[in-house]
Image (spheres, rainbow, N blue to C red):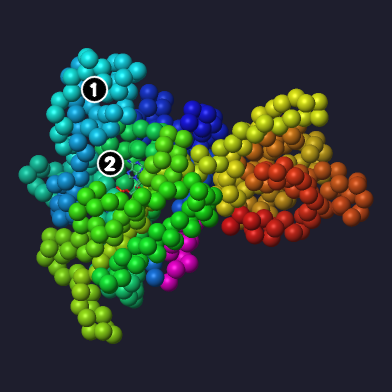
Amino acid sequence: MEKIVSLCKRRGFIYQAGELYGGLNGCWDYGPLGTELKRNLKDFWWRRTVQERDDVVGMDGAILTMQQVLTSSGHIGGFSDPMVDCKTCKGRFRADNVASMPCPEKPSCSVGGSPKCELTEPREFNLMFKTKMGASADESDPNATAYLRPETAQSIFVQYKNVLDSSRVKIPFGIAQIGKSFRNEINPRNYTFRSREFEQMEIEYFCHPKDGMRLTDEWLESRLCFYEEIGIPRTKLHILDVPDGERAFYSKKTYDIEYEFPFGIQELEGVAYRTDYDLGVHQKGAGRSLEYFDEETKEKYLPHVVEPSAGCDRTILALICEAFDEEVLTDDKGKEDIRTVLRFTPRMAPIKVGIFPLLKKNEEQVRIAKEIQRTLQPWMNVFYDDGGAVGRRYRRQDEVGTPFGITIDFETLGEGGEELKNTVTLRHRDSMEQERLPIAGLLAWLLERVR
Ligand code: GAP
């Protein structure tokens, strides 16, 4: 993890929020390349989940959430983790994690493991961030209190009826949302894995009660395929069929999709069959019917919900961990060298292609390289680099996961014969093999591979 964290900072993927002032614990800023990577992930999720399906529509809800919504959903009463204090070091810890946390005073022991530790009895700590709305906010006015949403799901349940009435969707159908969620985690840890501000990619899929179990299994399969498509192999994913007693009380079935992170096997996504719990509590809380009337069967019922809920930042972390590689290369003289490569699948890679004129001083090479850059730019993120030896330029792109490199050389200008004129060297990041491609076919060739 140390090498990954260092690379992420050095090459502009992820920085700690507020680092200049010492850092804000549990919050992260994405740099230029991290932002591109995140956009690629979110765009591809949206494409597969919403654009390419007839039965899912999207929404983008407010982050500030009404108190009544979260009272009905159960978050105000019960969205908490057990917390203990240590009277010696004054630290606060998640009670169910103390065994795996180093004691701040004696890191060779776990929290509670040193004779000096003096832990209190666990008590519940609500994880929501509370705030006041409006200039004349009054403590006693329930409408003046708002919360930063702890999950994107609640705005989907609250708007379910509006979407149904305004979109001509019929059961079964889903509403998808990507957006920020906030949890005041007691101990944020493992880099971006457990943060206080993070992004979720959630689908609430509304269905007839008889279809809930089947659809939960279907969504699990569909989500596993998605991870494969973004470059996380199935062999690195684990499916936890959450046993009775460990699931939320309203859930009839929950699968956790877990990934083998360097710090252990941990959850990436939950696929939960939430029954009619959510619509039921909001129907009761708001005093408005959320029942569905099936025109064909004339049946009236409260839909059930299957929820695939993925963490965007956790998936980004998994993508980076999966892509990171250090390859030992041996040159002709037997000298060893380490090549750092991020082996992102081309559709996730932040930069799709590096464009290199072989010689910076050769005006014709530079002109053609810039022309190729202008042709590709409307379609994909490219990087133009004319600094230093071309081998060094390749390595710089390997380190940030750019799958292809294009070099404009003397052959491009026709100096290697007529048949090579207007062709470029195309270098593959993973194999480091090179081939020649005509400039005119570059865009189509690349689009086929990076979408
Ligand atoms: N609506 C259901 C829900 O929010 P969850 O299991 O609490 O379920 C879903 O969260 C996903 O959101 C998790 O699988 C994880 O990927 C991500 N997530 C949850 N808490 C997180 C945190 N503190 N930091 C980063 N990601 C988090």
Q: Residue furthest front?
A: 243
Q: Which residue is pictured at 52% across the width and 29% down the height?
A: 3
Side of 139 relative to 307 (left or right): left
Residues rendered magenta in the picture? 44-54
**Residue 179 place in picture, x, y as percent:** 36, 51
The answer to whether residue 15 is magenta is: no
229 vs 381, nearest the viewer: 229
Give the Cα distance between marks 2 and 1. Answer: 25 Å
- From the viewer's perspective, is the residue at label 2 or at label 1 nearer? 1
Q: Is residue 316 visible?
A: no
Tell me the crowding category of disc 1: few under 14, some 14 to 19, or many 20 or more residues within 10 angstroms, Cα based.
some
User: Is ligand 1 within 8 Å of the beta carbon of the residue shown at mark 2?
Assistant: yes
Task: Please tell me which of labels 2 and 1 falls first in the chain.
Answer: 1
Q: How many marks?
A: 2
SS at mark 1?
loop
SS at mark 2?
loop
**Residue 198 place in picture, x, y as percent:** 36, 43
**Residue 180 place in picture, x, y as percent:** 34, 47
Q: Give the residue type at disc 2.
A: Arg
Q: Which residue is pictured at 45% across the width and 56% down the height?
A: 224
Q: Give the residue type at disc 1.
A: Gly
Side of 287 relative to 353 (left or right): left
Tell me the crowding category of disc 2: few under 14, some 14 to 19, or many 20 or more residues within 10 angstroms, Cα based.
many
From what the image shows, is residue 165 above or below residue 368?
below
The answer to whether residue 49 is magenta is: yes
**Residue 400 place in picture, x, y as percent:** 59, 38
For the C terminus, the image quarter is bottom right
Q: Which residue is pictured at 27% across the width and 29% down the height?
A: 98
104 vs 21, nearest the viewer: 104
Which quadrant holds residue 46?
A: bottom left
Q: Quickly name the residue at label 2.
A: 183
Q: Quickly name the residue at label 1.
A: 112
